[in-house]
Image (cartoon, helix red, strand yellow):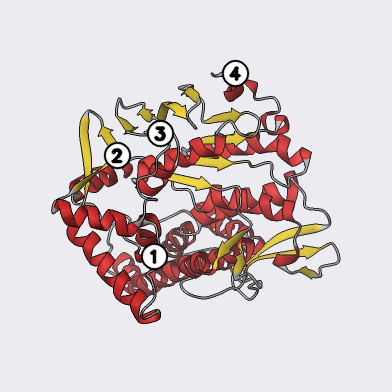
């Protein structure tokens, strides 16, 4: 499921855009100077798909439509371009709802493939939110006037983005729709993550370096995450090995004694199979995914009995299945390593994968470079491609904001080429917002110039 066009009217009260996506192209480039709404369009796409009413409410626009190649569409219409409903004073809204005594409709209207949805606030939840806020405020400052707070701030404090709405059917419908089209936004401010984000990605464990502002280096977070991914694959292989090793004697005996119909390889096929396993293990060793070792080999003129061939046939097939578990992560690491070490070539550094630590960078003299000491350009380059390869599900839509940040001109010129390659492999659709002609490079046919759209 791919986007076929985006239409937004009166963005910032000024711009009208209709952005057509070419049917056979995986990448669309939004190009314009600062201030034309490139980043806002990306965020509006994400907010529309996820039902983020706070962002839709706070962003000045009249309407937005996302149309897909299946004929489905989502349209959002606002009653007012500039007035923000959720940024209104929490106490005033509470008083209004208390007097209404019923649900209050918000000024944002959805239409999903012809089905209209009007969203209402749940008065019971809003009044309970105010009661908790009033109690907390008076306990903290008894006798003092309760400080003003916006409705949006209170919703975010209580993480009630969806619960405040009366009709949960809308969100179920939106979630069902979104299952067919995952959205991943790669923000421009991608070098650091909050402690909360880092903790969620690292299952609660913090990277070693947390700066004085309480943020964490994204490269360190992703290094730890990759280490966890490798550990998960190794555990999966361990469980598969336990299962196969337990049944190995019975399967061999069935083949030899009971003459069960297990496939028996010829000596040449066994030799080729063992060589294939050795070659694959060497590749996995080189990527740092497994320990060094050596697969058994058969001498050229060896005379092998039929029973021995049956045993070796089971061994070869078992190990093919075990090593195939690495295929997905190996392919992604291959591409990442190729981009970082060969195509973009970080100055005097090579990236390596360590199964126990994740990502490491080594100087030409083999001394290790701390991840937080990489240059901003090197960090941005790594983060962009890690997100594309490891954090974007197959057949999803990737929104990339200003990939050119801190990148060398040569890296910028290679970016779309590498992005198209990754999109082809994973079936992705990408929308890139940029004001760099070097990002566009030779791909003018993929570009939509917002400056000339209106």
Mark 3 vs 1, N-terminal side: 3
Q: Would you call the spot at circle 4 few (<14 residues within 10 Å), some (14-19), or many (20 or more)?
A: few
- In this rendering, the answer to whether 34 lies above or below 123 is above
In the rendering, at what x and y percent does residue 202 appear? 50, 69
SS at circle 2: strand
Task: Say which label, 4 or 2, has the lower sequence index.
Answer: 2
Disc marking residue 81: 3
CA gap, disc 4 and disc 2:
31 Å
* Furthest-left residue in this view: 101
Q: Which residue is mark 2?
A: 107
Name above or below for residue 388 compared with residue 275: above
- Would you say residue 111 is visible in this rendering? yes
* Disc 3 + disc 2, Cβ < 8 Å: no
Residue in the picture at 36% in, 81% down: 142
Density class for disc 3 (Cα within 10 Å; few <14, some 14-19, many ≥20) is some
Spatial distance from mark 4 to mark 1, Cα to Cα? Answer: 41 Å
| Spot occupied by residue 450 in the image (x, y as percentages of width and height) | 57, 24
Q: Which quadrant would residue 407 be assigned to in this image?
A: top right
Please name the residue that numbered disc 4 is placed on. 452
Q: Position of residue 54 (x, y in %)?
A: 38, 49
For the residues labelled 3 and 1, say whether their Cβ atoms are less than 8 Å apart. no
SS class, disc 3: loop
Q: Is residue 425 visible?
A: no
Mark closer to the chain start, 2 or 1: 2
Q: Nearer the viewer, residue 141 or 398?
A: 141
Nearer the observer, disc 2 or disc 1?
2
Q: In terms of sequence position, does the residue under pointer 4 or pointer 1 come before the other?
A: 1
């Amino acid at each position: 499921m791919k986007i076929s066009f985006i239409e937004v009217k009166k963005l910032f009260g000024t711009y009208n855009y209709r952005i057509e996506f070419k049917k056979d192209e995986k990448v669309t480039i939004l190009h314009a100077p600062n201030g034309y709404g490139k980043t806002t369009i990306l965020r509006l796409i994400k907010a529309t798909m996820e039902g983020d009413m706070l962002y839709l409410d706070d962003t000045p626009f009249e309407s937005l439509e996302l149309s897909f190649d299946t004929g489905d569409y989502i349209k959002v219409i606002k009653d007012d371009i500039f007035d923000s409903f959720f940024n209104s004073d929490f106490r005033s809204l509470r008083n209004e709802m208390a007097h209404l005594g019923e649900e209050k409709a918000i000024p944002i209207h959805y239409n999903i493939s012809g089905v209209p949805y009007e969203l209402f606030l749940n008065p019971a939840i809003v009044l309970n939110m105010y009661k908790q806020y009033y109690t907390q405020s008076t306990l903290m400052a008894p006798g003092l006037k309760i400080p003003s707070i916006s409705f949006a701030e209170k919703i975010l404090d209580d993480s009630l983005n969806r619960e405040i709405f009366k009709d949960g059917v809308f969100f179920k419908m939106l979630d069902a729709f979104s299952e067919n089209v995952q959205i991943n936004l790669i923000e421009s401010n991608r070098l650091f993550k909050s402690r909360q984000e880092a903790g969620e990605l690292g299952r609660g464990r913090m990277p070693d370096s947390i700066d004085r502002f309480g943020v964490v280096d994204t490269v360190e977070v992703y290094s730890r995450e990759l280490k966890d991914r490798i550990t998960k694959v190794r555990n999966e292989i361990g469980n598969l090995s336990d299962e196969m090793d337990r049944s190995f004697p019975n399967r061999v005996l069935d083949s030899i004694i009971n003459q069960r119909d297990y496939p028996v390889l010829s000596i040449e096929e066994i030799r080729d199979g063992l060589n294939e396993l050795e070659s694959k293990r060497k590749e996995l060793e080189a990527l740092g995914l497994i320990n060094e070792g050596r697969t058994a080999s058969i001498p050229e003129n060896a005379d092998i009995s039929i029973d021995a061939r049956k045993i070796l046939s089971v061994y070869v097939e078992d190990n093919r299945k075990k090593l195939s578990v690495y295929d997905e992560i190996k392919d992604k690491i291959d591409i990442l390593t190729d981009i970082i070490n060969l195509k973009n070539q970080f100055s005097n550094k090579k990236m390596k994968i360590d199964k126990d630590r994740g990502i490491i960078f080594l100087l030409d003299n083999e001394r290790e470079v701390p991840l937080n000491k990489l240059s901003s350009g090197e960090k941005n380059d790594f983060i962009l491609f890690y997100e594309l390869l490891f954090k974007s599900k197959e057949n999803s839509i990737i929104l990339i904001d200003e990939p050119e940040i801190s990148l060398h001109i040569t890296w910028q010129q290679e970016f779309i080429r590498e992005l198209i390659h990754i999109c082809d492999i994973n079936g992705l659709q990408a929308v890139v917002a940029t004001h760099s002609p070097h990002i566009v490079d030779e791909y003018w046919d993929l570009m939509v110039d917002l400056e000339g759209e209106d």
